[in-house]
């Protein structure tokens, strides 16, 4: 039975892509970007607690930028492996495959 016809549970990204975790340089780089974003979010939270609002805004912006890069890479990897625009839209919480394609189709 093909991956597209499975019923009952959602596939992990690695199952959908047919890869193992961190099997390529692009995936390892994506994990690094994700880690940077996570650290920036922790810094933002600490800055808010300290009352450093400008520092918190800067750190939150860095976390958002890292998340955006990671999302674009994940979409590109998924498309390279034949994942449908509908599946990508579902993963992103978007209303349609057309919306996903409009946002990420030029990658």
Image: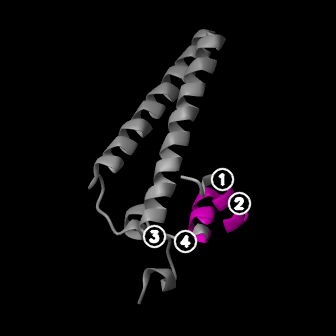
Whether tag 4 and tag 1 are in contact, CB under 8 A, the answer is no
Q: Which residue is mark 3?
A: 11
Q: Earlier in the sequence, mark 3 or mark 1?
A: 3
Q: Earlier in the sequence, mark 3 or mark 4?
A: 3
Q: Looking at the picture, how far across and down is residue 14, in whole percent? A: 37, 63
Magenta span of residues: 86-102
At x 62%, y 70%, the residue is: 86
- Per the image, label 2 sits on a secondary structure element best described as helix
- Per the image, label 4 sits on a secondary structure element best described as loop
Q: Circle 2: is it few (<14), some (14-19), or many (20+) Cα within 10 Å? A: some
Give above or below for 97 relative to 93: below
At x 53%, y 18%, the residue is: 46
Q: Which residue is mark 2?
A: 99
Q: Earlier in the sequence, mark 3 or mark 2?
A: 3
Question: Is 24 placed left or right of 31 in the picture?
Answer: left
Q: Circle 4: is it few (<14), some (14-19), or many (20+) Cα within 10 Å? A: some
Query: Of the residues tagged 3 and 4, which is closer to the observer?
Result: 4
Q: Quadrant of residue 34?
A: top left
Residue 103 got which mark? 1
**Could you tell me how far apart the alpha carbons at marks 2 and 1 are, in whole angstroms?**
6 Å
At x 48%, y 44%, the residue is: 70
Q: Earlier in the sequence, mark 4 or mark 1?
A: 4
Q: Looking at the picture, how far across and down is residue 88, in whole percent? A: 57, 63
Whether tag 3 and tag 4 are in contact, CB under 8 A, the answer is no
**Residue 89 magenta:** yes
Quadrant position of the N terminus in the picture: bottom left
Query: Of the residues tagged 3 and 2, which is closer to the observer?
Result: 2
């Amino acid at each position: 039975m093909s991956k597209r016809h499975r019923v009952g549970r959602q596939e992990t990204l690695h199952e959908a892509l047919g890869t193992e975790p961190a099997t390529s340089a692009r995936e390892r780089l994506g994990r690094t970007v994700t880690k940077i974003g996570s650290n920036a979010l922790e810094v933002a939270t600490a800055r808010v607690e300290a009352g450093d609002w400008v520092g918190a805004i800067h750190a939150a912006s860095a976390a958002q930028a890292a998340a955006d890069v990671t999302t674009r890479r994940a979409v590109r990897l998924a498309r390279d492996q034949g994942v449908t625009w509908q599946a990508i839209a579902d993963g992103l919480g978007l209303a349609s495959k057309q919306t996903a394609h409009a946002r990420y189709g030029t990658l």
